[in-house]
Amino acid sequence: MPPDPGDSPPLGAAPVSLLDPETALSLLRADPEMFAAFTGEPLLAVRVCGPRALEVAAFARRLPCVLVGVAADPADAPSGVESAGFDVLLTPQNAPPAPWVGPLRPGQTTADALAAIAATARAVPSAAVAFAQLVRYSAGIDVDDAVVAESFTYSTLQGGPEFAAWLAGHRAERERRAARRAAAGGPAPAPEGRPATAPTTAPATDRAVLVERDGDELWVVLNRPRVHNAVSRDVRDGLVSAFALAGADPSITRVRLRGAGRTFCSGGDLAEFGTLPDPARAHAVRTTRSIPLALLRCGRPVTAYVHGTCVGAGVEIPAFAERVVADPATTFRLPELAMGLVPGAGGTSSIVRRVGRERTAFMALTGWALDTSVAADWGLVDEVRPVGGDQHPER
């Protein structure tokens, strides 16, 4: 996955206009397309003050733009603002009530968060707006249906120019790294169409997912520690099979999920990105061999034990579990929008149901990492205690 951008706005980022509600309403009524992915500004940021702020949300939540509300103090915001339709609600207050987001770290400001959201919306307007529209919709439907809706959106964006640009850049960087290794006497560059990095799969004797029976419990272990348990086809198929096994065996009463090595899961295996022949086939595979749908359908309570740097699928899949236990040093990040995509492992279904769509949108639109204390405060984590990939969490 892309590197963690940290908590600073991009250098040279264009300023963000924070509008008062009256001005925003006037602009919206004069030309609704002023705030849209391609006909105008993809971000509408509004001060949440007075009842007119609710009118802005009622108008703009149907538009193809990202809608952000900002208030100095949530206690002074108009009643009903939390359900008015803002995609993100920001405040400088520390540890504000849900769904508001305050500073995550000392020194961080609302302006920093707004600049990061604006940078994402302007860099990848298709993905940012599609994400906002998706979570507005998926928050109100069945959890399984929300997974399918996410796949439709993800597949659509796979055929778009933003993902194509990211993929071209990623492949070019792989080729540069391979050329540098070859010049230094390392392995020769891989053939066209094959990963130009060192092999990312485990040896043939190692299984990508281990399944261990312990009494009436089934332990499922991600077993690609050399690549931080990146989700490959083998991992996907192993998890789907493990959850199907749990659902088919009435003597199994609980499933426990963990990852070997230093990281629970670093997200999707980038070496496999863009390798399916077309977005339609990708959607068919994603909904036929779906990790989140398999987990939901197994019908057994699942406890996930997470540690290290959890990225993308490493955040999204555990969020479906009944209980998430996190090591104190764990971090959580959703970087997919920077790739021109939306979360693709069910996060717009699972994370939304744990922390709310506004906080999910904050994570995805900024790309910032949450530490374990914030994740626990928001409800993304149920328990914090030492959990390591090389030790059994319950022994």
Image (spheres, helix red, strand yellow):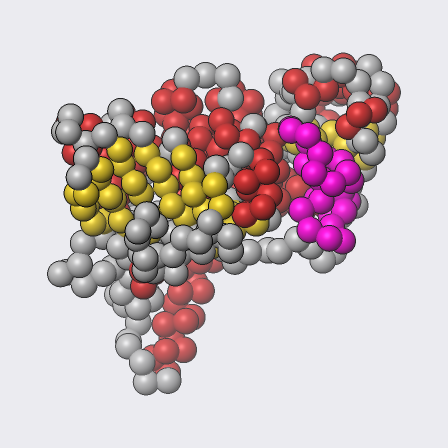
Residue lying at 43% horizontally and 43% vertically, measured from the top left: 325
**Relative side of 145 to 18, left or right:** left
Relative to residue 279, is residue 308 drawn left or right? Answer: right
Answer with the quarter of the image where residue 61 lies: top right
Where in the figure is residue 221, as x and y percent of width and height? 27, 49
Residue drawn at point x = 15 percent, y = 29 percent = 251
Q: Where's residue 142, x and y in %? A: 41, 17
Taking 7 as reference, is 145 above or below it? above
- Which residue is farthest bottom? 185
Q: In which quarter of the image is residue 236?
A: top left
Location of residue 118 with respect to 177 vertically, above or below: above
Q: Main secondary structure of the magenta part?
A: loop
Q: Which residue lies furthest to the front in this view?
A: 395
Q: Which residues lie in the magenta part?
A: 90-114
- Number of numbered discs present? 0
Question: Which residue is at the front of the view, 21 or 109?
Answer: 109
- Coordinates of residue 266 in the picture (x, y in percent): 41, 53
Residue pictured at 44% horizontal, 53% vertical: 386
Q: Give the camera-side residue of 189 and 260.
A: 260
Residue nearest the viewer, comparing 232 with 318: 318
**Res 306 seen here:** yes
Q: In which quarter of the image is the N terminus?
A: bottom left
Please tell me whether residue 233 is drawn above or below residue 356 in the rendered image: below
- Taking the magenta stretch, the answer to whether it contains residue 137 is no
Q: Residue 23: image x %, image y %? A: 86, 24
Is residue 68 at least partly visible in the picture? Answer: no
